[in-house]
Structure formats: structure tokens, C-alpha cells
């Protein structure tokens, strides 16, 4: 055998797709996204609540408080697209490892922070970590699974990630109350990043050969299973600019999916920063806030175990629209109801809403993106989705600042989610290969 033979030249049947046949690698990718979720989740309860006490952020300065989310969203959004494009050239595993290397300064910057600007700087590195590492877990799972399994695959991926977000929020709230926020976050994040880098290097395989083998099978007509309805209008090897423009606004279904991604991150920005502040201001302790935010993350994560497979059975479009509107109902209920038990229930409702839309937006993009440029298409969608953090932080921060209250930000978010669901309902086609496409309204 020629030792110089590359993975791209390997026989197509050497890289079969399917969860069962690739279970070992599938599990390690799930472990990776769980660790990625722990890193972002450690900030969700502690930092918004202790911002005034430990970092001098005025409680009424909502825009300044949200600035760390703006920096995170802008960097993560841009790095999502770069990661997708880069992984098509240097491989998924290399980009994953680069993401973990970028995470190393995060706990150090938080621990030694002299002002809130240090936290903003830490979140620049967090954006790189999330943009590279989380993106690659999604792309790798799509590479090694069949088209009719992608709802299940993305559901498991996002379950692992967001269950970790919820667990980390609860764990760091307890650790911060016991040992102080700086020590808690330093110890927690350092342990997670070290474990993630080690397992990525030792156990994770490169999955780019699976994507190349799938491309060859489609080209030769030997691909088994349902035939995907790939979006046409791009060349076989489009440039980065062509993919970005096509997915962002030229194709009506892709553009509808992208705007829905923005809307869901606007809501997540509210629930990440302003919701804990709102709860704490109404008398909940830090640990109680951790339980509420943890319930949101855990219900979001766990529900994706059934919402992803649900979209494999009934299609992507209906669960996504239902999720946007259920999330809107939960956001509105959060300011209408009072009491720890009520807020805990609302958090679960919002988590289920997120679960209905979150993995199925990713699966819908993967459904109609050609294997040649699928990673770039996913990167473009994730660019817009995670730039929604920055858009949401800016808009909601200005709204709260102008009214000197948090409640108006909840109502703006509710209206945004309702409008987003209507856009998707009217403009997007069904993408699942086993379900007939719906005709979008002109």
C-alpha cells in the first residue's frame, strides 16, 4: 500500500455513516461538547450577580454589565464561520484543539481581574473557545451520521452541551458561595480545560474523511438512504464569500433559519444575564438563582434527547416554530409570575422551548447543505446565531438602560420571538429528506 495515500483517497466504504457504526467516536464527541458546556456554564449564575460587588459594575448600568456578552457574541459569531471554513482545509480535530488552547487564559483572567474589562477580555477568549470547539463537535457528529439521524445526533450533541451549562451554573454557584467566586471559577475552569485538551488529543479522531466519502458517494450515486434536497445555486467548490452570502440572505430557507438563530440567542442573552439579576433583585439567594438557571439549562439539554428525534419523524419546521413561540410564552410568564416555584416552572418551560428549536435549526441547515460546503454553511448559520448574543446584549441593554428597569427587556424579547416564528413559518421550506417540502409564502 502506498504510504502517501491520503484520507481523501481512501475507499468510500472505509468511512460508513451512522451512529451505531461510529459509536465510539460519537461518544467522545459528546464528551467534548459536555466539557465545552461546562466552560460557558460556569459564568451563567455567578458573574451577573457578583458584577457589582466584586467588579464595581453599577446595578443600573445594564449596558456595561452586558458588555461581556457583546464581546463574547461578536468573537464567537465570527469564529464560528472561520472554524467552519478552516476545518474544511486543516481538519475538524485541529480546530477543536485550537479552541481548547484558546480557553487556557479564561480562568486566569477572571481570577486576577482588577476590573470588569478583564472579564470582557476573558470572554474574548471564551468566544474563540466556543466558536472553535463547540462548532467542531456539531460538524463532526454530522459528518459521521446519516441524514435521517441528524435530528437525533444534534439533539444528543446539544443535550450534552446544555445539560453541562445547567450543571456548571448550579455547581459554580455552590462553590462560589463556599470558596468565593474567583477561586471557584479558577479551580472549576482549569480542571475542565485540562481534561478537555487531554481527551481531544488522545481520543478524538479526524472526521473530515467521512464528509469527503459522503461527497464521493453522492457524486457516484452509491449513497444509501433518503436522498437529501441539497440547496442549488452554488458551484461545487464555492468561495467563503459565496457561501456566506448564499446562506445569509440569497436562499429564503437558509436566511429564515439564520434569523431564527439570532432570535434564540437574543432570548438566551436575556436569560444568561438579566434573568439572574432580575431574580436576585426579587429576593432569591445566589443558590436559588442557580437552581432556576440550572433548571433552564438542564431542561433545555435533557429535552433535546426527544426534540431532536421528534424532528426526524415529523420534520424540522414545526418543532422550530413551536419552540420559538413556547419560549416567547415563557419569557412573558417570567415577569408575570412571582415566587421561587413559579420561576422554576417557567425556567423548565423556556428550556423545553429552546430544546424544540435549537438542535433542529442546526439539523435543518445540515439537511440542505452539500457535503462540500456543509461545514461553511453551518459556520455561517452559527455566525448569525451567536452574533445574536451581541445584538441581544446591545438592544436589551439599551432598552433596560433607557427605562432603568429590566422588565421592558422581557417584553421586547417576547415580541422578537413571536415575529421570528412567524417569519420561519411563512418563508422556510421543510428540509428533512423524508418529508415533502412546504411551499413558502412569497
Image: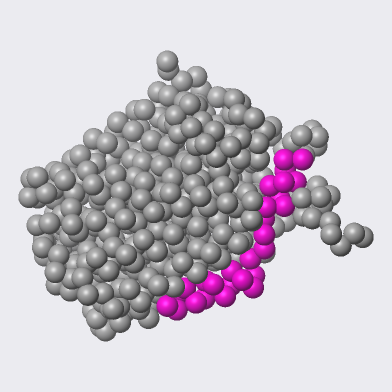
Q: Looking at the image, how many numbered discs can be counted on the residues?
A: 0
- Is 376 contained in the magenta span? no
Residue 115 placed where, x, y %? Answer: 21, 70
- Is 196 contained in the magenta span? yes
Location of residue 423 (image quadrant): top left
Query: Toward the viewer: 202 or 270?
Result: 202
Looking at the image, residue 192 sits to the left or right of residue 416; the answer is right
Residue located farthest toward the top when viewing the structure as drawn:
442
Query: Toward the viewer: 430 or 2?
Result: 2
Looking at the image, residue 315 sits to the left or right of residue 103; the answer is right
Location of residue 25 (image quadrant): bottom right
Residue located farthest toward the right when viewing the structure as drawn:
1
Residue 89 placed where, x, y %? Answer: 64, 51
Q: Residue at x 61, y 35 (%)?
A: 238
Q: Work out whether 304 lies above or below 332.
A: below
Residue 252 placed where, x, y %? Answer: 47, 26
Q: Work out whether 364 lies above or below 7.
A: above
Q: Residue at x 24, y 56 (%)?
A: 67
Q: Residue at x 64, y 56 (%)?
A: 91
Q: Work out whether 368 lies above or below 213.
A: above
Location of residue 426 (image quadrant): top left
Task: Examine the rendering and report whether any part of residue 270 can be seen.
Answer: yes
Residue located farthest toward the left when viewing the structure as drawn:
404
Task: Examine the rendering and report whether any part of residue 352 can be seen.
Answer: no
Colour mapping used in the image: one colour
Residue 19 placed where, x, y %? Answer: 66, 54
Magenta stretch: dominant secondary structure:
helix
| Residues shaded magenta | 190-216
Q: Residue at x 53, y 52 (%)?
A: 83
Looking at the image, residue 160 sits to the left or right of residue 59; the answer is right
Query: Toward the viewer: 49 or 71?
Result: 71
Looking at the image, residue 329 sits to the left or right of residue 250; the answer is left
Amino acid at each position: 500500500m502506498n504510504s502517501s495515500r491520503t484520507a481523501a483517497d481512501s475507499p468510500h466504504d472505509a468511512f460508513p455513516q451512522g451512529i451505531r457504526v461510529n459509536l465510539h467516536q460519537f461518544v467522545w464527541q459528546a464528551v467534548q461538547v459536555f466539557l465545552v458546556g461546562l466552560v460557558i456554564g460556569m459564568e451563567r449564575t455567578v458573574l451577573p450577580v457578583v458584577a457589582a460587588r466584586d467588579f464595581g459594575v453599577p446595578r443600573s448600568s445594564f449596558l456595561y454589565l452586558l458588555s461581556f456578552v457583546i464581546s463574547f457574541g461578536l468573537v464567537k459569531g465570527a469564529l464560528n464561520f472561520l472554524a467552519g471554513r478552516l476545518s474544511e482545509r486543516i481538519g475538524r480535530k485541529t480546530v477543536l484543539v485550537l479552541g481548547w488552547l484558546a480557553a487556557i487564559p479564561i480562568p486566569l483572567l477572571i481570577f486576577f481581574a482588577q476590573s470588569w474589562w478583564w472579564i470582557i477580555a476573558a470572554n474574548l477568549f471564551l468566544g474563540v473557545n466556543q466558536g472553535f470547539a463547540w462548532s467542531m463537535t456539531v460538524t463532526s457528529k454530522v459528518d459521521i451520521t446519516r441524514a435521517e439521524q441528524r435530528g437525533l445526533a444534534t439533539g444528543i450533541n446539544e443535550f450534552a452541551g446544555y445539560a453541562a451549562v445547567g450543571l456548571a451554573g448550579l455547581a459554580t454557584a455552590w462553590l462560589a458561595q463556599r470558596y468565593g467566586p474567583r477561586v471557584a471559577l479558577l479551580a472549576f475552569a482549569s480542571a475542565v480545560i485540562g481534561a478537555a485538551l487531554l481527551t481531544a488529543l488522545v481520543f478524538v479522531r479526524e472526521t473530515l474523511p467521512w464528509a469527503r466519502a459522503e461527497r464521493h458517494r453522492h457524486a457516484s450515486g452509491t449513497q444509501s438512504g433518503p436522498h437529501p434536497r441539497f440547496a442549488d445555486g452554488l458551484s461545487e467548490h464555492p468561495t467563503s464569500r459565496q457561501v456566506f452570502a448564499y446562506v445569509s440572505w440569497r436562499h429564503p430557507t437558509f436566511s429564515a433559519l439564520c434569523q431564527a438563530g439570532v432570535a434564540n440567542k437574543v432570548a438566551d442573552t436575556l436569560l444568561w444575564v438579566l434573568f439572574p439579576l432580575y431574580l436576585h433583585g426579587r429576593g432569591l439567594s445566589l443558590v436559588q438563582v442557580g437552581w432556576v438557571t440550572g433548571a433552564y439549562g438542564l431542561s433545555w439539554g435533557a429535552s433535546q434527547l426527544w426534540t431532536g428525534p421528534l424532528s426526524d419523524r415529523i420534520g424540522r419546521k414545526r418543532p422550530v416554530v413551536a419552540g420559538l413561540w413556547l419560549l416567547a410564552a415563557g419569557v412573558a410568564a417570567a415577569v408575570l409570575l412571582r415566587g421561587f416555584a413559579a420561576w422554576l416552572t417557567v425556567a423548565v418551560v423556556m428550556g423545553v422551548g429552546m430544546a424544540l428549536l435549537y438542535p433542529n435549526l442546526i439539523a435543518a441547515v445540515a439537511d440542505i447543505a452539500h457535503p462540500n460546503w456543509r461545514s461553511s454553511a453551518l459556520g455561517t448559520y452559527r455566525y448569525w446565531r451567536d452574533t445574536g448574543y451581541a445584538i441581544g446584549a446591545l438592544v436589551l441593554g439599551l432598552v433596560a438602560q433607557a427605562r432603568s428597569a429590566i422588565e421592558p427587556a422581557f417584553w421586547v424579547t417576547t415580541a422578537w420571538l413571536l415575529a421570528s416564528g412567524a417569519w420561519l413559518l411563512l418563508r422556510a421550506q421543510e428540509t428533512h429528506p423524508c418529508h415533502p417540502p412546504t411551499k413558502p409564502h412569497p
